[in-house]
Amino acid sequence: MTLSPYWRAGLTLLLTLATAVACRAADDAASTAPEQGKIDLNQPYHCMFTETPVVIDGVLDDPVWQKAPLVSMATYGKRERPLSLTEARMAYDRDYLYVAFKAYDEDIWSYLTERDSSTASEDVLEVFFKTHPERPAYFNFEINALGTVYDAYHVRRAGTPERPQSFFYKRWMRWDCEGLRMAINIHGTLNDPTDRDEYWIMEVAIPFRKAANSPPVRPLPAVVFTTTKSGAA
């Protein structure tokens, strides 16, 4: 299968969990916290091609998910092991980029339901990628535990003291990804802080044909995952 050089640098995906998840006491998260230390993310993640479309149902039992390499997330910037473990896998076929997340979280919460809400202020999983590695434009998907989508096509990275990056958010979010599919599977009780949840799963299928201003191409199997924490409380 011949793949376009526009994708040669691969995709970079960013997963975000709200700070509320990180603020638990360390002993509460001991059962899910990975071993302390730095995580080496210098090696690319090899994105698998699948002939069989992934069933987007929030259950990670598709054959490709049994074979796709597993990535454990690191905190953004410092690349340290996070308090709560989050895992991800990726695959693609001729029509979609597939991403599967499993995020361990003892208090899963999300309330926003309107499209393009500030979902990053809640428990959220995010995907960012560029189709042209030499150009500044990139795509942004932020999906909370209710399945509420914030999606945007950022023409460029923008931000000055007079006009910070947030000034442009409404402009970029006018783009919607038609055909986006996702499924959420929560092992716990959403929005109930009185009990202890286990984890939540998100499967997402992003259609290549909706990569705005990009040729109809597929990525080379080289992807890097990173993770960060948002400023939510």
Image (cartoon, rainbow, N blue to C red):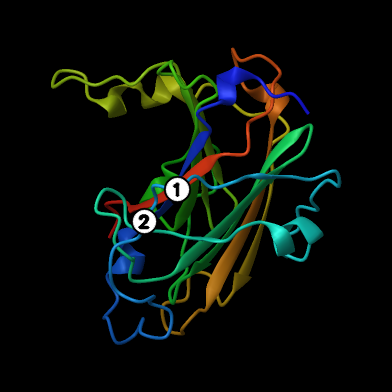
Determine which quarter of the picture holds residue 135.
top left
Q: Nearer the viewer, residue 36 or 143?
A: 36
Instruction: Tell whether 114 sits left or right of 32.
Output: right
Who's the residue at 59% across and 12% down the image? 213
> Which amino acid type is shown beneath numbered disc 2?
Asp
Residue at disc 2, secondary structure: loop
The residue where tag 2 is placed is 40
Above or below: residue 107 compared with residue 62: below
Nearest the viewer among 2 and 85 is 2
Quadrant position of residue 189: bottom right
Residue 12 x %, y %: 47, 38
Where is 199 relative to 145, above or below?
below
The type of residue carrying mark 1 is Gln
Task: For the C terminus, give its image quadrant.
Answer: bottom left
Name the residue at 79% across, 45% down: 50
Q: Alpha carbon of mark 2 to alpha carbon of mark 1: how far?
A: 7 Å
User: In the image, residue 41 lies at what x, y percent?
Assistant: 39, 51
Q: Which mark is residue 116?
A: none
Res. 43 mark: 1
Q: Residue furthest right?
A: 52
Local SS, label 1: loop
**Residue 195, can we see it?**
yes
Q: Tell whether label 1 touches label 2 (CB within 8 Å).
A: yes
Q: Quadrant of the N terminus?
A: top right
**Residue for point 74% across, 24% down:** 2
Q: Is residue 199 above or below residue 174?
A: below
Q: Does the rendering let one see residue 58?
A: no
